Every structure is written in structure tokens, then in C-alpha cells.
Image: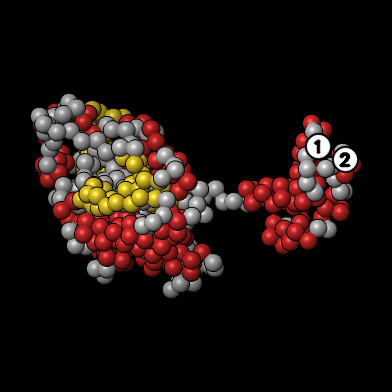
Amino acid sequence: MIDGPRAIPSIDRLMQRPGISALESRYGRRAVIDAVRAEADALRTVIAQGSPSGDPGAMVEAGATRRLAGLFQPSLRRVINATGVVIHTNLGRAPLSEAAAAQVARLASGYCNLEYDLDAGSRGRRDLHAEVVICRLTGADAACVVNNNAAATLLTLAALAAGREVIVSRGELVEIGGGFRVPDVMAQSGAVLREVGTTNRTRTSDYAAAISERTAAILRVHPSNFKIEGFTQRPAVGDLADLGRRFNIPVLDDLGSGYLGNDAGGASDALRDEPCVASTLGAGVNVVMFSGDKLLGGPQAGIIAGRTDLVETIRRHPLMRALRVDKMTYAALETTLQGHLAGKVEDVPVTRMIAATAGAIGARAERLAASLAGTAIEATVVDGFSTIGGGSAPGSALPTRLLQLRHHQLSAHALEARLRTLDVPVIARIEQDVVVLDLRTVLPADDEFVLHGLHG
């Protein structure tokens, strides 16, 4: 038993304990002293309320160890996505390919020619990086990159339409993830929205009737997770491009997902209705904006591509400096794009996951289920569906095989919560009060980790 507050060793004596001294090499002396003092003060409060058993020095050491581990635990951690949502916005959207991650590591750990012209030996421009490969893949004349697709749309409208009208269909004024609404983002550009048509039907004639001397552009917006079925009408992209040419008004298209039309296996079936960047530009659209971390499979980025004079006007706008990307984004994006250009789309995790067959996923699930036989978890493999997510291919349902988990002692919610407490958290989903894992979105190399976590 502890006699009282005086039984707690001094801070100097506590710092001499081998266990606490070992903490210094990991966390630094200042942080360790602060943690030891905080734990000593907390123990004095506990002692004042009663006399706990145990060695006070060991109690302070244990508390300081826990406190420091929590303090130095990164808030951003790797997780295993077993939800079956391929482009999961909450889980960081597209995982990078091994080649892209390696290129980021190479450039992040040293200097690079981000704004240096190696041929001229003088200052260069960062907004030219990745442009050549973007143009090769999409057929665009010019391109630039900003930090996400909302920024791409904001910058494009600010540069081309500030103070003037942009014609947009009412059916395309949607709300995207996180409560951000397309009209609000567009309004920040200084452009004036001119809404035409109705929620479910907008015709080319509606756009034509709204054109005036105040019109700066016509804008199409990908509906993201929003899908209207039934009595609907939306002009073909080529019809809007023809209208724009007739009135000499640029047509802009916020494509969202950035589908390049490159597929591995059966991915094209799920993406049949997804707009393709090259096809959209080929139909006559003047500028497109799309994401880098959705179907393209790269880092978070907003890509602007299209007609040279319009892209040059966009890249010269003052907002470009505020929205530009860093060397790590360029490294990951350019490497990912080069993979598409080389036809190595199977190396892009997102493309590979979408193309995975239910049979291949089921074989992995069956192996895990067999390995769990005789444990506290009853595992069965059943049919189910994955989804693409991230606002891409709304309503998509990819046939898959799910690993159902029932714990003999834990409820579904308790088991799901336990999986989230692993060193590398496993994010599952619950269906009909049963935990299910969809291995479509689990990298094969992580199967053993998932199994180890379930055995724990």
C-alpha cells in the first residue's frame, strides 16, 4: 500500500528508472518529463481519494508510457478497407500503385526540379508537370493540375466567367460529399449561375434560349452519387458542343471521376455509362475538369484539360497559386498516368479491384473461412455486391463474395469495433446484424493480417 503523496518518488528519481529512460530515446526528454509530471500529479489525486495498491514509480511509468503512446500516435493511419467500396472517400479514395508510391518516396526525401528548368538552368514552371502525358491520354491541347476537382471547377469558372453568366441545368446542381454543394462552389468563382430546364428534363433548346451577351460559358456537371431514372432528358454532350460552336461560347464539363477508358478485365461493364475524358473532348467540349484520385487511381488532384487558349487563361489566374499542388502530388500523378499510357492499368489498384471477379474474391474468402474453423468466429462465404463509390458510376453493383463473421461471444457491433482497434484497423461493414468483409477492396498482401486480427 502507498502511505501518501510523499511515497511518489521525485521527478528526478522517476526519470532515472530504466523504463522511463528508454522512453527518452523514442519521444525526447522534454515530452517524457511532461508526461511523467502529469502522471505523478494524477497519481497524487488518486492517492488523496484513497490508497491504491502498487508501486507508485511503476504506476507513473506505466501511465507515462500510455500517455506518450497516445500523444505520438499519428492521427492519419493506414487502414484495411474491407467494406467493398472501391473509391471510399472516408478512407482516402484511391490507393496508389506501388510505382507511384515509390516515386513519391524518391522525390519527397530530397530535392527535385519542381520549378527549375534543367535545360535552361534557370527558374521553371511547376504547372507544366504532367501536362504532356495528360494530353497524350485525353487528346487535350493543354492541361494543368490543381489540388482537387472542386478547385478545378472553381478556378476554371473564375478565370473564364467571373462577373458573367454560366448556363447550367437544374438537374446538375447537386450536393457532393461532405455537404458541399456545386452551386455554392461555383458561386465563389464570381460567375453568375443561369439555371435552365427542370430537375428531370433539360433540352438543348433550354440552353439556347438562355444565351445572351452576358453568357460566358455553358457548363455540364457530372451528377456524382445522384441518379434520376424514368421520365428524364439530358442533351448529348455533342449537341451542347455544337451549340457552343454556333454561338462561340466555350462548353465546360465537370466530369468528376476522371474515367480514361482504360480497363483491366471486366471493369468496362461496370463503367459502361461513365463519361470518358477523351470521348468528351473528342465530342467538342472545350475544357474538362476531373479528379485524380477516383477512377484514374492516383493522388488527390483536380485536372483541367482542353483548348490551349482557355487553359492558358486558367493557369494565369491568381487563384492558381493558391490551388496548385506540390511535388509529391505531381510525382504520384505523373507515374499513375504513365501507367495508363503504357497500358499497365492492372498495376493501378482501383482498376484491378473493379475488374476482380466474384470467383477470385470468393477463393480468397474461402481460404480465410477455412483458417477460422475451430475459433470463436464462425465464418461463411455468401454472395453479395461491392460498389465503386466516390461519386463514380452511381448505382453500380459489382457481384462479389462476402466473408460473413459471427463471434460466439461478441455482438456484430462489438466485433466490428474490435476490428477497428487493431494496429492496422480493419474497416468492415454490418449487414443484417452480421459483420461482413468484402475482400475486393483488401489488398491480397493484407489477407494474412486480417486473418491474424480475427484470431486475436
- Quarter of the image for residue 16 reads bottom right
Label 2: state its secondary structure. loop
What's under tag 2, amino acid-wise? Asp
Label 1: state its secondary structure. loop
What's under tag 1, amino acid-wise? Ser
Contact (CB < 8 A) between labels 2 and 1? yes
Q: How many marks?
A: 2
Q: In this view, does 219 lie above or below 60?
A: above
Is disc 2 surrounded by few (<14), some (14 to 19) or many (20+) residues within 10 Å?
Answer: few
Question: Residue, x 45% and y 48% (percent of image)?
Answer: 419
Residue with the mark numbered 1: 51
- Position of 405 with respect to 34 (left or right) is left
Residue with the mark numbered 2: 3
Q: Position of residue 36 (x, y in %)?
A: 77, 48
Of 242 and 7, the residue lying toward us: 7
Question: Residue, x 21% and y 31% (percent of image)?
Answer: 171
Of 146 and 45, the residue lying toward us: 45
Decide if residue 287 is in sight here: no
Q: Residue furthest right?
A: 6
Residue 154: numbered disc: none
Q: Where is residue 31 in the image (x, y as percent from the top left)?
A: 73, 51
